[in-house]
Image (cartoon, rainbow, N blue to C red):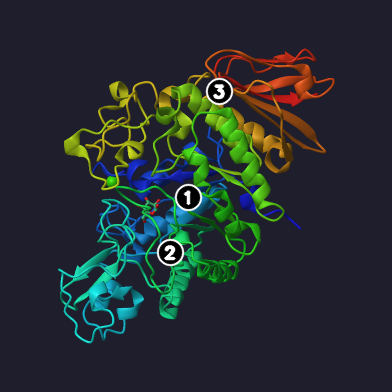
């Protein structure tokens, strides 16, 4: 059996608004992506990733920057046209790059025609496509008319803003459910027509040649059918993550994912990675472990870890074990919803170690644009804040040139960027880093090239090493063709791994060091020295 491509691929997430602007309106677009594909793949100078994940580019009023979809089957004019999309797929495939796109099954925009029709009347054929309920006080009474003074149907809370997950609609005297903004009503997945419609959406894009989907908040398409109160507060003020929630991860989610998978597989070799935002690793595992649901699932527990080698070791080991035998791990430390590693951990050095880690662990890595440059979060002046969820800092435009060279748009745009460039764009930008052999970009290229040429780093087994220094995280990757030791020093002082911790007769050669200073060094039985916040990939020989 050939191994599925997504187990060996490195994915790169493109946030289209912030990647490259081709028409000077300050907002990235599909044409900009086409123009810059060479940066990602196809030439010896390219970064060398295998697939891209495109965040939403669909028609949208942009209250959640595209995660509020008003038409699943068209491109928002700000990003381009369907023709641009087709061209993008073709250009990417020509370079050997696969393309997966965001699929947003849990909710739509309130401007979507489905919701517009649903809210028209209680008798609308689209009424049950969304979740409508009477005020809590009305239930069990014959009279209607709880009005906006009534009590929401249950205690579920909405993400962003922290208010109730229900908004009252006076026209029909009922509340609709929205797990996110009031402008993002939740679809009703108990309604077969909704499931069918989402299947058709998938078919539409599969026919256009996409290689798969990243399924947005997929754990939310299963909710307790009786809409009982959550036992505890999980979102907003007072949230403590304890208790039990009934607004997501209900067992029905699993059969729904299985049927989505059937649609996917009917189109051949396509994949689905899920944003399963459950932080308990045991709850996450069933989404991938059976081999019959998601091909991959992002592990968000991993994104919440403190900068601590032991915490990472435990999380890696637990995730690995929970997914065996049929699941395959996925590793990422950045996306468009989270503070960047260079900002939440100790700076550029941590960004380097993070890259070394996720590109050499056993599993599929996901990179987020700009991570390969070691970008930090942007600083957003109060008057420029646009995201209701406070996520502007990680969404700043990608600097292609130093502003002193490429103008104030940093090569991203010749207009005015929709968000400020990240801090230090003068140093951390594509052009400057591409010509600096010690840059973060050079490190990512070296790691990706090594991974491509060494199957042990892609498909080999992995064992975590028991190092005595608690600030060192080390593991071995191996197959019949070779063996590598990867060692990361989380401390801001030097560290030493003794010979006996590496195994008898350890001999090797440094292939890559996070500092980019030590490639080619020989390592003998004496052990391994690591500089402050440095990491090494050592090939045993
Ligand atoms: C996911 C997306 C996030 C979006 C939310 C609601 O978490 O990654 O950006 O706001 O879903 O669609
Ligand atoms: Ca544009």
Residue 445 visible in the snapshot: no
Left or right, 251 with respect to 226, comes to right
Q: In 3D space, how far apart are the residues under numbered discs 2 and 3 (Cα atoms)?
A: 38 Å
Query: Looking at the picture, how far across and down is residue 350, in whole percent?
Result: 49, 25
Crowding at mark 2 (Cα within 10 Å: few <14, some 14-19, many 20+)? some
Which mark is nearer the camera, 3 or 1?
3
Crowding at mark 3 (Cα within 10 Å: few <14, some 14-19, many 20+)? many
Left or right, 200 with respect to 383, comes to right
Q: Which of marks 3 and 1 is nearer the N terminus?
A: 1
Q: Residue at x 58, y 34 (%)?
A: 312
> In the orientation shown, which residue stands out farthest toward the right?
505
Query: Looking at the picture, how far across and down is residue 520, in whole percent?
Result: 69, 17
Which of 102/180 is in front? 180
The disc placed on residue 246 is 2
Q: Earlier in the sequence, mark 1 or mark 2?
A: 1
Q: Residue at x 61, y 65 (%)?
A: 268
Query: Looking at the picture, how far across and down is residue 165, in whole percent?
Result: 30, 61
Q: Name the residue under label 1.
A: 53
Q: Name the residue under label 3.
A: 490
Q: In 3D space, how far apart are the residues under numbered discs 3 and 1 (Cα atoms)?
A: 30 Å
Q: Which quadrant of the figure contains the N terminus? A: bottom right
């Amino acid at each position: 059996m050939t191994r599925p491509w997504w187990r060996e691929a490195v994915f790169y997430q493109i946030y289209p608004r912030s990647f490259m602007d081709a028409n000077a309106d300050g907002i990235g677009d599909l044409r900009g992506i086409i123009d810059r594909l060479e940066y990602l793949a196809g030439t010896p100078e390219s970064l060398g990733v295998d697939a891209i994940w495109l965040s939403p580019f669909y028609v949208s009023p942009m209250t959640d920057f595209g995660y509020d979809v008003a038409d699943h089957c068209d491109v928002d004019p700000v990003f381009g046209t369907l023709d641009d999309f087709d061209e993008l797929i073709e250009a990417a495939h020509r370079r050997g790059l696969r393309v997966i796109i965001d699929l947003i099954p849990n909710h739509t925009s309130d401007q979507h025609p489905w919701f517009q029709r649903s809210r028209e009347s209680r008798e609308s054929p689209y009424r049950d496509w969304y979740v409508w309920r009477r005020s809590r006080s009305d239930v069990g009474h014959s009279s209607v008319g709880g009005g906006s003074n009534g009590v929401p149907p249950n205690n579920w809370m909405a993400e962003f803003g922290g208010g109730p997950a229900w908004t009252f609609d006076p026209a029909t005297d009922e509340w609709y459910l929205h797990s996110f903004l009031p402008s993002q009503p939740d679809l009703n997945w108990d309604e077969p027509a909704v499931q069918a419609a989402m299947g058709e959406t998938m078919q539409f894009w599969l026919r256009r040649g996409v290689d798969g989907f990243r399924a947005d908040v997929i754990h939310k398409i299963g909710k307790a059918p009786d809409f009982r109160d959550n036992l505890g507060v999980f979102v907003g003020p007072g949230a403590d993550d304890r208790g039990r929630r009934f607004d997501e991860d209900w067992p029905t989610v699993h059969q729904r994912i299985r049927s989505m998978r059937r649609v996917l597989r009917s189109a051949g070799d396509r994949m689905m990675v899920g944003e399963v935002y459950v932080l308990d690793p045991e709850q996450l595992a069933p989404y991938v472990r059976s081999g019959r649901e998601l091909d991959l699932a992002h592990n968000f527990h991993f994104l919440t870890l403190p900068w601590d080698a032991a915490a990472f070791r435990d999380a890696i080991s637990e995730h690995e074990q929970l997914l065996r035998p049929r699941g395959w791990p996925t590793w990422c430390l950045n996306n468009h919803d989270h503070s960047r590693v260079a900002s939440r951990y100790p700076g550029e050095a941590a960004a380097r170690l993070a890259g070394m880690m996720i590109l050499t662990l056993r599993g599929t890595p996901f990179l987020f644009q700009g991570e390969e440059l070691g970008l930090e979060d942007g600083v957003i002046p109060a008057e420029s804040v646009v995201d209701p969820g406070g996520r502007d800092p990680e969404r700043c435009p990608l600097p292609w040139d130093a502003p002193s060279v490429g103008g104030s748009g940093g090569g991203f745009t010749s207009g005015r960027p929709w968000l400020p460039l990240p801090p230090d764009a003068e140093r951390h930008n594509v052009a400057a880093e591409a010509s600096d052999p010690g840059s973060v970009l050079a490190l990512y290229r070296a790691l990706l090239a090594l991974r491509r040429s060494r199957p042990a780093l892609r498909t080999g087994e992995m064992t975590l090493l028991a190092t005595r220094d608690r600030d060192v995280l080390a593991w071995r990757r191996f197959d019949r063709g070779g063996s590598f030791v990867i060692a990361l020093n989380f401390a801001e002082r030097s560290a030493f791994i003794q010979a006996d911790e590496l195994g008898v007769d350890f001999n090797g050669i440094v292939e890559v060091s996070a500092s980019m200073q030590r490639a080619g060094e020989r390592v003998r039985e004496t052990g391994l020295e690591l500089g402050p916040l440095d990491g090494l990939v050592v090939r045993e020989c």
